[in-house]
Image: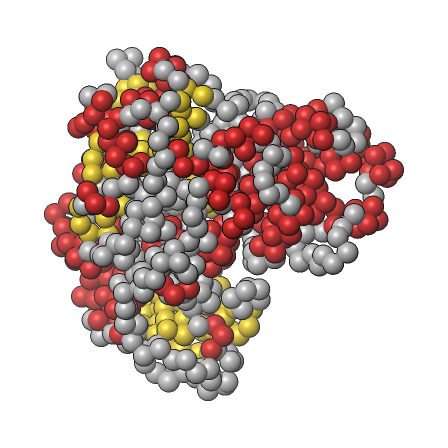
């Protein structure tokens, strides 16, 4: 069946299906493809537009409008945290970097202690299927840019070789343009847009783009469909009503969209946990200035990462010692780069002119402090999050150790992204960063992994869904995206979301 | 640095901005009233999301935040931000932008100034921006960061700014590389007519 775009819909629409899937990202597209291939009649609703490689202009402003949720302007109520998520067919997999990680064993074990049923062994077939379809391979040396090479050099110079790692990539035939975050114009970066979405489409699923879901339709505690609408892609004005009648609804609208839809639908819940436990893996950048001209804006952003400080190490007295983060080699194009650098006026301009001399590392903080996704006045989203408490020392440790790595790699100086424009020139100064106060509120915090807001667990009083995504207390309603993860997984969650969605979909297909 | 003295957005508005706005009222009346803002707009400008005063404040802030950048047209940057904001469906985003621009315009007492930001001299404006950026309160700092985001992003996404940075620009249009083909099944190019007829069963 074709992928239908909003402009093609000329009147109210009523569809009947076995399953309605909300969302086409890492969770929804996998579920749609598996169920459609199993013979189910599947209708998929996607809030964002349908763009393909030919639409990807490699321009930050244009692509932000096309593929980013909230046009790139979704932030916490206090303005400290910018949430990045996809809003297009393919969801966040269209803008993710395609550096790929399975869930760490220790994190799955932690979930098992809380009653989550999935194990490394039970998920293995799902990971294997997803890895094959997404063409996950070890990054070849030819795809490693200067930034990644310098970070590796710094790690080796510090004697931290075992703490760094070449990262697997979901790519096939990469041409090295470097515009992964703006949608791959060559269809070389694997995303659900070019894998699971076409699979679902070819298997007969009907996919509606520009069709935000408004409400899950319930009869008592039983699902009977989804009410949605088709909107104008540019103005977002409502155009036509859409109703999908289906006895099974799978919601995969992401860590923000899924809880909002459940809350708007007044889904009956004993836990009161919808929207709670919001974790985001706060991302901060640190820059090293090198004398040589670097090619960091080309090739994949992250083929090498610092993973050896992922787990928190405590001191003998139980206090925080180090770790609780991973660091990704990263790069930015000029627009976002300008936002991430500290200072303004002439000082900022001086730093901008060093664009081709900067290497950078970007944090994935394994956050323990949580925020909330809620409905505010008038039904508007109210997103509460701030890096605070136990997570602040992790950020300082990230800055400190990454400064050491960049200096060891040959950087003349290292810049923190604070408005005080902190400059680090020696290993001793880098060590001191770990314990000095730093203003996190004034620097850009980009939060890319939106998780935890419909967390899974066996007990209806403590969790929104069970281990298979089934919403406690509601028949026919399933969640299959990152929102079901009970904690951060401390690495990019895309592959794990896909594997869990695959496991959930196979279980649904088997149930008939 | 964060600390226990920080206030929520609502509390900050109630306690802090109420005071600063009170200080700013005479200046608003004398030099920054709505008519004055509109008179300060380019004649051919048609704002889509920002109001006249918001545009003027953003343009003034951009001129200082990006001082020294070549080429720099603060009005063009503010106009690009306005056009982008017009495409944002979530009204909370525009409300947020309006809120931070209000802090910039009327938060001048943080730097010891009693007139709105947009009518201050450049040295005083720099002082206000510095005070916002380094305020002990979280709210002015995040307001500064948001305005800097609008200015920096919509300036440095213009082609004319790239050469000085050594950035060559997109490959698309320069490097002839067609995408690998993806089969989405039958793509329906014709309008999909539904009317009152239910879509046929799948």
Q: Nearer the viewer, residue A154 or A325?
A: A154
Q: Residue at x 30, y 18 (%)?
A: A321
Residue A22 is situated, as x and y percent measured from the top left of the image, at 38, 63
Q: Residue furthest bottom?
A: B197
Residue A294 is situated, as x and y percent measured from the top left of the image, at 35, 37
Q: Quadrant of residue B10?
A: top right
Is residue B200 visible in this depiction of the protein? yes
Instruction: Name above or below for residue A473 compared with residue A154.
Output: below
Q: What colour scheme does the image use?
A: secondary structure
Identify the image quadrant of the C terminus of chain B. Answer: bottom left
Q: Residue at x 67, y 47 (%)?
A: B75
Instruction: Name above or below for residue A123 compared with residue A153.
Output: below
The tally of labels here is 0
Q: Residue furthest right?
A: B30
Is residue A386 visible in this depiction of the protein? no
Q: Residue at x 68, y 43 (%)?
A: B59
Residue A69 is situated, as x and y percent measured from the top left of the image, at 46, 54
Q: Residue at x 35, y 77 (%)?
A: B187
Residue A52 is situated, as x and y percent measured from the top left of the image, at 37, 65
Q: Quadrant of residue A29?
A: bottom left
Q: Nearer the viewer, residue A295 or B151?
A: A295
Asked if residue B49 lies left or right of residue A400, the reply is right
Asked if residue A327 lies left or right of residue A70, the reply is left
Q: Nearer the viewer, residue A263 or B62?
A: B62
Instruction: Name above or below for residue A75 compared with residue A125.
Output: above
Asked if residue A123 lies left or right of residue A496, the reply is left
Instruction: Name above or below for residue A314 compared with residue A50.
Output: above
């Amino acid at each position: 069946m074709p992928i239908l775009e909003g402009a093609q819909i000329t009147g109210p629409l009523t569809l009947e299906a076995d399953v309605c899937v909300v969302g086409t990202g890492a969770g929804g597209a996998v579920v749609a493809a598996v169920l459609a291939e199993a013979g189910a009649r599947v209708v998929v609703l996607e809030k964002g537009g349908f763009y393909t490689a030919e639409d990807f202009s490699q321009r930050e402003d244009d692509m932000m409008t096309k593929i980013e949720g909230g046009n790139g302007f979704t932030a916490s109520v206090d303005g400290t945290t910018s949430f990045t998520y996809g809003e297009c067919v393919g969801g966040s997999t269209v803008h993710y970097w395609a550096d790929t990680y399975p869930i760490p064993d220790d994190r799955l074990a932690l979930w098992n202690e809380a009653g989550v049923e999935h194990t490394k062994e039970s998920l293995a077939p799902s990971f294997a299927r997803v890895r094959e379809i997404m063409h996950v391979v070890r990054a070849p040396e030819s795809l490693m840019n200067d930034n990644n090479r310098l970070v590796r050099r710094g790690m080796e110079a510090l004697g931290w070789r075992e703490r760094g790692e070449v990262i697997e990539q979901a790519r096939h035939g990469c041409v090295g343009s470097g515009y992964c975050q703006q949608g791959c114009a060559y269809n070389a970066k694997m995303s659900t847009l070019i894998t699971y979405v076409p699979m679902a489409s070819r298997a007969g699923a009907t996919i509606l783009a520009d069709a935000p879901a408004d409400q899950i339709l319930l009869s008592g505690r039983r699902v009977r469909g989804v009410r949605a609408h088709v909107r104008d892609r540019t103005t977002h004005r409502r155009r036509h009503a859409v109703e999908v009648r289906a006895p099974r609804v799978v919601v995969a609208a992401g860590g923000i969209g899924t809880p909002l839809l459940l809350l708007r639908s007044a889904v009956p819940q004993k836990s009161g946990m919808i929207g709670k436990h919001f974790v985001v893996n706060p991302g901060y950048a640190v820059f090293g200035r090198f004398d040589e001209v670097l090619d960091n804006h080309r090739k994949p952003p992250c083929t090498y990462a610092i993973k050896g400080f992922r787990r928190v190490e405590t001191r003998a007295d139980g206090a925080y010692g180090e770790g609780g983060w991973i660091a990704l080699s990263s790069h930015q194009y000029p627009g976002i780069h300008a936002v991430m650098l500290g200072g303004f006026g002439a000082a900022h301009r001086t730093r901008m002119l060093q664009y081709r001399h900067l290497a950078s590392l970007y944090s994935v903080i394994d956050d323990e402090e949580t925020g909330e996704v809620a409905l505010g006045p008038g039904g508007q989203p109210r997103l509460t999050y701030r890096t605070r408490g136990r997570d602040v020392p992790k950020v300082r440790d990230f800055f400190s150790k990454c400064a050491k790595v960049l200096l060891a790699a040959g950087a003349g100086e290292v810049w923190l992204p604070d408005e005080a424009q902190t400059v680090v020139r020696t290993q001793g100064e880098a060590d001191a960063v770990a314990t000095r106060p730093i203003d996190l509120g004034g620097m850009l915090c980009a939060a890319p992994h939106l998780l935890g807001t419909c967390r899974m667990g066996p007990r209806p009083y403590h969790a929104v869904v069970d281990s298979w995504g089934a919403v406690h207390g509601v028949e026919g309603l399933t969640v299959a995206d990152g929102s079901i993860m009970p904690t951060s997984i401390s690495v990019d969650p895309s592959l794990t979301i896909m594997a869990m969605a695959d496991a959930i979909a196979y279980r649904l297909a088997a149930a008939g | 640095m964060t600390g226990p003295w920080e206030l929520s957005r609502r509390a900050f508005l109630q306690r802090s901005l109420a005071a600063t706005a009170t200080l700013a009222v005479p200046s608003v009346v004398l030099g920054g009233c709505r008519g004055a803002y509109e008179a300060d707009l380019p004649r051919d400008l048609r704002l889509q999301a920002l109001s006249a005063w918001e545009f003027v404040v953003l343009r003034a802030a951009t001129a200082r935040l990006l001082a020294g950048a070549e080429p720099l047209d603060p009005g063009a940057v503010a106009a690009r931000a306005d056009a982008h904001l017009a495409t944002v469906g979530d009204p909370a985003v525009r409300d947020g932008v309006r809120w931070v621009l209000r802090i910039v315009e009327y938060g001048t007492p943080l730097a010891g100034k009693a007139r709105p930001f947009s009518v201050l001299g450049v040295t005083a404006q720099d002082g206000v921006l510095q005070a916002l950026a380094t305020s002990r309160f979280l709210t002015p700092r995040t307001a500064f960061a948001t305005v800097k985001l609008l200015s920096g992003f919509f300036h440095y996404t213009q082609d004319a700014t790239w050469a000085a940075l050594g950035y060559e620009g997109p490959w698309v249009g320069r490097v002839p590389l067609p995408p690998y083909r993806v089969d989405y099944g039958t793509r329906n190019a014709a309008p999909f007519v539904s009317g009152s007829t239910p879509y046929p069963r799948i």
